[in-house]
Image: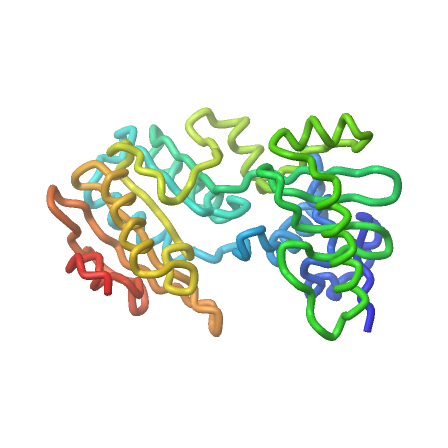
């Protein structure tokens, strides 16, 4: 079988509901919707982001009102421990496009007007290299994630389904061709010197970019979820990242240490995951003391590694 891709905005918008199941066969360059997009273009951005997969295999799945109950739970504990007129520091990490950060920030700023809110992810943009009729989409580090040559848009960071052997052959050819370019460490400059056009494509939700322009207390930045922020924040959220499906026990322990070192004493860590089968959230609200964590409450069954965090045993 062959599966052709969506390589233009017109193709994608005309595809209707079919586009939601298209995954990596949508050209990631279509994430570029400009600074003043229509609501239809924003929805297209969200649909593409929903199925986007980064080079490390992580899906950037998110959708509107995904954390509505988490936001409400966070607000309850924030109002319990912090004055609403204080300039609390909030960090929301591993947020993909930042859509859920934007929704949370809306309620935060209405209640905590002086709060400073940072949304972050390890990936904020992609780089499009194009020449003639072909395009490579790369992460900033130089790893190719997609090859586009109409009518094909094929993933390069992982293999397409076996039922699409022609797509897999196109991807194999594209990876070999890219390897022969041998661009080296300064790959952007080297590609441009060889006649490739370079364009940056934001992976940040348009509403997030708009809010960061409008409100100086809100920003989106590139940050590793394992960063230790030196006790810089009062509230830290890390949803759908510190899970057994992504990391072994040792790395999860490192993530908990990073959260501990990032929060001030008395700070709140919001951590958990969304179950795929019913999209329910299972979250633990932990408060940092001088020596460890205190459990404040849960949504659902809580974070799967809650016991390890409280007891310090990660086996």
- Residue drawn at (48%, 49%) of the image: 100
Give the image quarter of residue 154. bottom right
Q: How far from the left and from the top, in percent, is residue 224?
A: 42, 41
Q: How many marks?
A: 0
- Residue drawn at (13%, 44%) of the image: 289
Q: How far from the left and from the top, in percent, is residue 70?
A: 37, 55
In which quadrant will I find the C terminus?
Answer: bottom left
Between 188 and 25, the residue placed more toward the observer is 188
- Is 138 placed above or below 17 here? above
Question: In screen coordinates, is 11 left or right of 261?
Answer: right
Q: How far from the left and from the top, in percent, is residue 182?
A: 70, 39
- Residue drawn at (74%, 40%) of the image: 181
Give the image quarter of residue 82. top left
Identify the image's colour scheme: rainbow, by chain, secondary structure or one colour: rainbow
Visible residue check, residue 61 = no
Between 83 and 272, the residue placed more toward the observer is 272
Question: In screen coordinates, is 63 left or right of 240?
Answer: right
- Residue drawn at (60%, 56%) of the image: 50
Question: In screen coordinates, is 17 left or right of 106?
Answer: right
- Is 6 placed above or below 225 here? below
Question: In screen coordinates, is 57 left or right of 17?
Answer: left
Between 188 and 240, the residue placed more toward the observer is 188
Give the image quarter of residue 282. bottom left
Q: How far from the left and from the top, in percent, is residue 67?
A: 43, 56
Visible residue check, residue 223 = yes
In which quadrant will I find the N terminus?
Answer: bottom right
């Amino acid at each position: 079988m062959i599966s052709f891709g969506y390589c233009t905005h017109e193709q994608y918008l005309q595809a209707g509901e079919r586009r939601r199941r298209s995954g990596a066969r949508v050209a990631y360059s279509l994430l570029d919707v400009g600074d003043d997009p229509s609501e239809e273009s924003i929805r297209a951005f969200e649909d593409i982001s929903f199925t986007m997969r980064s080079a490390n295999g992580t899906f950037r799945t998110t959708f509107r009102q995904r954390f509505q109950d988490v936001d409400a739970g966070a607000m309850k504990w924030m109002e319990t421990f912090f004055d609403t007129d204080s300039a609390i520091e909030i960090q929301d990490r591993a947020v993909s496009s930042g859509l859920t950060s934007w929704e949370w920030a809306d309620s935060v700023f209405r209640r905590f007007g002086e709060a400073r809110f940072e949304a972050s992810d390890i990936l904020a943009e992609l780089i499009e290299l194009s020449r003639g009729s072909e395009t490579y989409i790369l992460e900033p580090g130089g790893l190719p994630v997609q090859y586009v040559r109409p009518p094909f848009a094929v993933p390069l960071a992982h293999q397409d389904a076996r039922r699409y052997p022609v797509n897999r052959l196109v991807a194999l050819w594209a990876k070999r061709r890219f390897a022969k370019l041998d661009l080296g460490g300064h790959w952007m400059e080297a590609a441009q010197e060889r006649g490739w056009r370079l364009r940056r494509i934001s992976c940040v939700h348009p509403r997030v970019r708009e809010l960061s322009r409008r409100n100086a207390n809100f920003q989106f930045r590139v940050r590793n979820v394992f960063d230790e922020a030196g006790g810089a924040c009062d509230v830290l959220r890390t949803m759908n990242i510190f899970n057994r499906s992504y990391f072994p026990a040792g790395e999860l322990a490192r993530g908990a240490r990073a959260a501990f070192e990032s929060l001030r004493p008395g700070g709140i860590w919001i951590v958990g995951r969304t179950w795929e089968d019913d999209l329910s959230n299972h979250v633990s609200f932990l408060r940092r003391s001088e020596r460890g964590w205190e459990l404040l409450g849960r949504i659902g069954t809580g974070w799967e590694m809650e016991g390890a965090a409280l007891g310090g045993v990660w086996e």
